[in-house]
Amino acid sequence: MVIMDSELNCSRKNNVKERENMKKFLALTLALVMMLSMFVGCSSKEEATTAAPTEADGTTADNTTVATSGTENIRTDFVYGTGFDIVGFDPPDCNDSYSGEMFTYVYDRLFQFDSEGEIQPMLVESYEQPSDTEFIFKIHEGVKFHNGDELTAANVVWSLNRASQNPKAKANFETVIEISEVSKYEFKIVTEKPFVPLLLNLAHSQTSILHQATVEAIEAGDGVFNETNMMGTGPMMLEYYKPNSELKMVRFDDYWQGACRATSITRKIIPEASSLTIALEAGEIDYINELNSIDIARVRENPDLKTVEMASANVAYMGLNTTKAPFDNVKVRQALQYASNKESIVEVLYEGFGVPCNSVFPTVAVAYNDQLDAYAYDIEKAKELLVEAGYPDGFEFEVVVSSDIRSRAAQILQQDYQSVGITVNIELMEFGAMLDYLSGKDHQAWIMSWSGSTNPNYTLTQNFHTESGGATGNRGWYSNPEVDAMIVEARGEFDTEKRNQLYKDIQAKLMEESPWIPLLQQTYVAGMGKGVDGVIMYKTGSRYYHQAVVYED
């Protein structure tokens, strides 16, 4: 079942009877989902079932890739390739999407997003909201951790309280003043004031439910979280990890929603984009979520491969440290907006597979403001602003990046900025090291991407609220009391139209002040073997591989 945004208004607009009907409907729907999921499991080889009807681009109606080979044998040890390694193993301590992707398999959360970006219960069976500031949740009974222990409300309460104390995860718990156990399978969250995004935040990987005894043993020992001590209730278990090389997860057969199709998922880290494509062509990997744009035509011509094209939910951007000169001057930041030839980046770097960005939100995001005027590429306007800011001869700065594709984007900007007298030095760093570096205030600029299509409050709080400066996510240390107040106001606004208008107004203000230079929203072209089946692709940018298999000749 999809809980629509209006469901979040229930405390003000719905009566008790409506809430009870909703609870019954939730329970019935989730029961059906659990019943159906019991038929999902498979062995390492299985007989092929009838494939779902296919769209023209090779996907089913729910964006699940389907096999086209028609063979009877199915390989269930799925391998995908990516250019980025994970950063850590403790969910509250990691706010990067690469670690978060791994966490979604090993751990469960209380809520999850569906293919349309709407919130749905996960570990939560039902909930009620007695008042604007109080939620009471009931979790499913019989959910097992990987070691066989049953999940109880006490463990949930402990996990959430622990996460709320981590500076990197605290944005998920804004205004929360109490998380407490009600009964063995029920718990309560109380907020200081109405907090509409709470359920959305409880779907974030940082609010994953961990095994209390395991974590306490780690913290009582050497305090090191690694691949040997991850204990969750998710569909997969981590088997091994080789830094900057690969990690492998294996199926948890007693998963409470039924064993998944993939018996294992191996993530291979291949930083160089062309090498990633070569690995796909050689059969070393089964799937690439984001093909190197110059390789797309070659992959499409290969009869052993296929592609699926989807707009991403990622905004690639250059962030600026607003506490350091010259980026403490808004006119300098605006000058960079005008001096950035975003269309050139899309064409040169991505072969046209993307669109220039005019917001810190992607186009598929909730409350995306499509009325914003983009900064047109205008060198003369950029020069004019630099003169007004006191930098008629330009200046020099360093931008840090963590991948080949980001380095090439920086090189294009480097050429753009030369025309206005600005010299750019590019520093390539490993991703985890870069995040650590950006937690301080020594940096000047960086290029990264952000995927924030489902939770506007999280995007804005993490990246632009004063209290999130540093490791929490606001790496540019941007601070504006007006923006802070608007973010807080939106959190407590139950009226969807009014709340979305606030989000749109905030986007306009952020583009005016330009702590980020949004560059582009890429169009992803996923490449895969022709027999790949079951990769779940959401328009929100999420990809899930636990149901993926490969039909073999």
Image: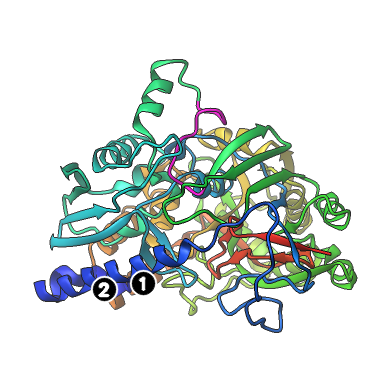
Mark 2 touching mark 1, by CB under 8 A? Answer: yes
Structural crowding at the residue carrying mark 1, measured as other residues with C-alpha within 10 Å and reported as few (<14), some (14–19) or many (≥20): some
Part of the protein shown in magenta: 225-235
| Residue closest to the eye, 211 or 274 | 211
Q: What residue occupies the far front of the structure in this picture?
A: 47
Work out whether residue 356 can be spotted: no
**Which residue is drawn at the image coordinates 71% and 84% (left, top)?**
56
Q: Which residue is mark 1?
A: 1
Image spot of residue 75 (x, y percent): 73, 56
Q: Quadrant of the C terminus?
A: bottom right
Dividing the picture into quadrants, the one containing residue 454 is bottom left
Image spot of residue 491 (x, y percent): 27, 60
**2 or 1: tag closer to the N-terminus:** 1
Q: What residue occupies the far top of the structure in this picture?
A: 221
Q: Which residue is mark 2?
A: 25
Above or below, comparing residue 502 to residue 127 in the picture: below
Looking at the rendered structure, the secondary structure element under dot 2 is helix
Left/right of residue 452 with respect to residue 504 in the rendered view: right
